[in-house]
Image (cartoon, rainbow, N blue to C red):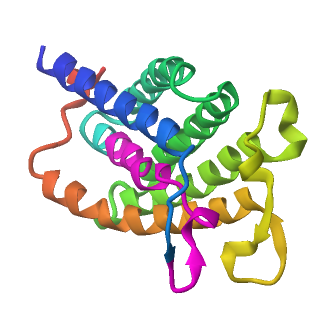
Amino acid sequence: MQYLRATALYVVLMTIVVVASNFLVQFPVLGSAFGIQLSDLLTWGAFIYPAAFLVTDLTNRQFGPRIARRVVFAGFVVGIAISYHTSMPRIAIASGTAYLVGQLLDISVFNQLRRQTWWRAPLAGSLIGSMLDTILFFSLSFALVFGFLGANDEFAIGSAPILGVFATEAPRWISWAIGDFVVKLLVGLVMLLPYGALMSVVKPMPPAKAA
């Protein structure tokens, strides 16, 4: 029963993160800083999504990669189904693909490094997973070559200086992707704090209980 409750909790947390990030990625951060228009650089989803890697890593630590994959797949099915009603279908498709690939890569990297220094596995897994997730999500969501996936956001594909400061112009979503990844790097570092704090609570369970 304890095992089922813990697994259900991880699924619920993963679903909340996926749905929230899918919805908030549609909203640029307004305002400016250091002369840079933040709407050309960031969306609010970038601040929420890295929590998905924290959920995956805690599941992996407690139950191992097999159960972590189950949580990822459960979060994928439930989260993407709900996302179809809270965001554009193309965003949901892109998010689902990027989420699944990025999270499964995170599980693989985490599992390879889990016996090393405590912070290496969650940090490396989340950063590598975030990189691939960002590339897949923004390409599938906004690149014209993937237009067959559905309608696009005209604001996202409009041209703007890269990162709002460089002379070279590119579709606005490229700056969003760069800004998104930078935020994920920073938030990934911050997520080490709750991971480290929960290590004494979320302890690996015996293999027999995780089967």
Q: Is residue 104 left or right of residue 3?
A: right
Q: Residue at x 38, y 28 (%)?
A: 15
- Look at the image and tell me whether residue 139 can be seen: no
Q: Is residue 185 left or right of residue 6?
A: right
Q: Is residue 92 magenta?
A: no
Magenta segment boundaries in residue numbering: 33-57
> For this rendering, which residue is in front, 207 or 105?
105
Q: Position of residue 116 (x, y in %)?
A: 34, 64
Q: Is residue 176 left or right of residue 186?
A: right
> For this rendering, which residue is in front, 11 or 152?
152
Q: Position of residue 105 (x, y in %)?
A: 55, 45
Q: Residue at x 48, y 54 (%)?
A: 46
Q: Quadrant of residue 93?
A: top right
Q: How many numbered discs? A: 0
Q: Is residue 165 above or below residue 151?
A: below
Q: Quadrant of the N terminus?
A: top left
